[in-house]
Image (tube, helix red, strand yellow):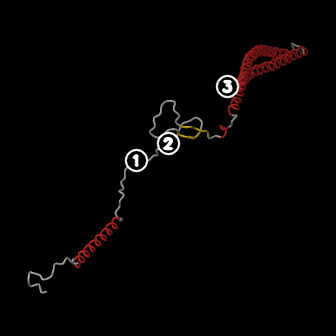
């Protein structure tokens, strides 16, 4: 009972020590709880740790498909890309269809566009023929104006020469009339002197006076003709210049009409 002797009077017993096991299980349970709490705290703190790393770098962002980004195509007729048959990185060869273009103007959707265009071309061709006829008519008009200009100028040249000769003749007649008047004045003065001396009669004096008046009238007439001839000569030269300017304006207008027809 007191276990004073090494020899036990009791038979051996295999009864386990349950208290020891209970102590060990409680110890491991505390460790597991602490470990679980520590892992929970660790994972909770990991939620606040930034997992994405941000860096800055220059570059360009584009899409893989060309239909998803804007494309510029130089074209005479405006349109739009309706469908792409290739994508980035595809190999193409000559003759392959890359894209399908469609019109954006309403007039190009006209089913009778070809017929209308053909009609416009035919109308333009006929208008070209009419313009050619107009140009030929203008050329004939220009030739006629040039011929008339030459004839008119030649006619007025002859008229200028005629008026010049008439002016020369009238000037000579005026000069002769002036001399005759001076002679008549001298004769009348001598006749007056002789009459004063009683050597000539009054009838002879009056006859000489009448002769003086006739020569004076002829002088005035000759002077008037000479001045009139001068005016005719000046007017002929003015008419010559006017004719030249008039035909010049007509020819310039015809040439302008011709160039306008050519430009149309």
Q: Earlier in the sequence, mark 1 or mark 2?
A: 1
Helix, strand or loop status at disc 2: helix
Q: Residues within 10 Å of mark 1 (few under 14, many from 20)?
A: few
Residue lying at 48% horizontally and 40% vertically, measured from the top left: 87
The reply to whether residue 171 is in sight is: no
Q: Which residue is at the front of the view, 53 or 157?
A: 53
Residue 56 falls left or right of residue 148: left
Indicate which label's residue lies in the foreground, 1 or 2: 2
Q: Which residue is at the front of the view, 146 or 107?
A: 107
Hey, which residue is sitting farthest left in the picture? 5
Residue lying at 34% horizontally and 63% vertically, measured from the top left: 49
Q: Earlier in the sequence, mark 2 or mark 3?
A: 2
Residue 143 is situated, as x and y percent measured from the top left of the image, at 72, 17
Marks 2 and 3, how far apart in space?
48 Å
Q: Quadrant of residue 244?
A: top right
Q: Are marks 2 and 3 in contact (CB under 8 Å)?
A: no
Disc 2: which residue: 66
Disc 1: which residue: 59
Helix, strand or loop status at disc 3: helix
Q: Earlier in the sequence, mark 3 or mark 1?
A: 1
Residue 75 falls left or right of residue 237: left
Q: Quadrant of residue 166?
A: top right
Residue 108 is situated, as x and y percent measured from the top left of the image, at 65, 37
Residue 173 is situated, as x and y percent measured from the top left of the image, at 79, 14
In the depicted structure, whether residue 35 falls above or below residue 64: below
Disc 3: which residue: 262
In the depicted structure, whether residue 165 falls above or below residue 125: above
Residue 212 falls left or right of residue 109: right
Residue 73 falls left or right of residue 114: left
């Amino acid at each position: 009972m007191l276990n004073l002797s090494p020899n036990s009077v009791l038979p051996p017993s295999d009864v386990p020590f349950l208290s020891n096991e209970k102590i060990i299980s409680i110890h491991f349970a505390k460790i597991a709880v602490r470990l679980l709490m520590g892992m929970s705290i660790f994972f909770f703190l990991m939620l606040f740790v930034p997992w994405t790393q941000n860096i800055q770098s220059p570059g360009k962002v584009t899409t893989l498909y060309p239909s998803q980004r804007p494309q510029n195509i130089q074209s005479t007729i405006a349109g739009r890309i309706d469908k792409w048959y290739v994508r980035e990185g595809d190999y193409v060869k000559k003759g392959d269809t890359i894209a399908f273009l469609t019109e954006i103007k309403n007039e190009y959707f006209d089913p009778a566009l070809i017929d209308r265009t053909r009609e416009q071309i035919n109308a333009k061709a006929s208008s070209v023929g009419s313009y050619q006829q107009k140009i030929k008519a203008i050329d004939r008009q220009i030739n006629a104006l040039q011929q008339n200009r030459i004839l008119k100028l030649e006619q007025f040249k002859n008229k200028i020469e005629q008026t010049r000769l008439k002016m020369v003749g009238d000037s000579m007649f005026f000069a002769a009339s002036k001399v005759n008047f001076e002679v008549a004045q001298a004769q009348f003065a001598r006749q007056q002197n002789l009459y004063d001396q009683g050597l000539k009669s009054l009838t002879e004096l009056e006859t000489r006076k009448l002769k003086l008046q006739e020569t004076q009238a002829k002088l005035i007439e000759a002077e008037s003709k000479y001045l009139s001839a001068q005016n005719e000569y000046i007017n002929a030269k003015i008419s010559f210049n006017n004719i030249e300017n008039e035909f010049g304006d007509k020819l310039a207008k015809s040439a302008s009409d011709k160039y306008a027809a050519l430009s149309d």
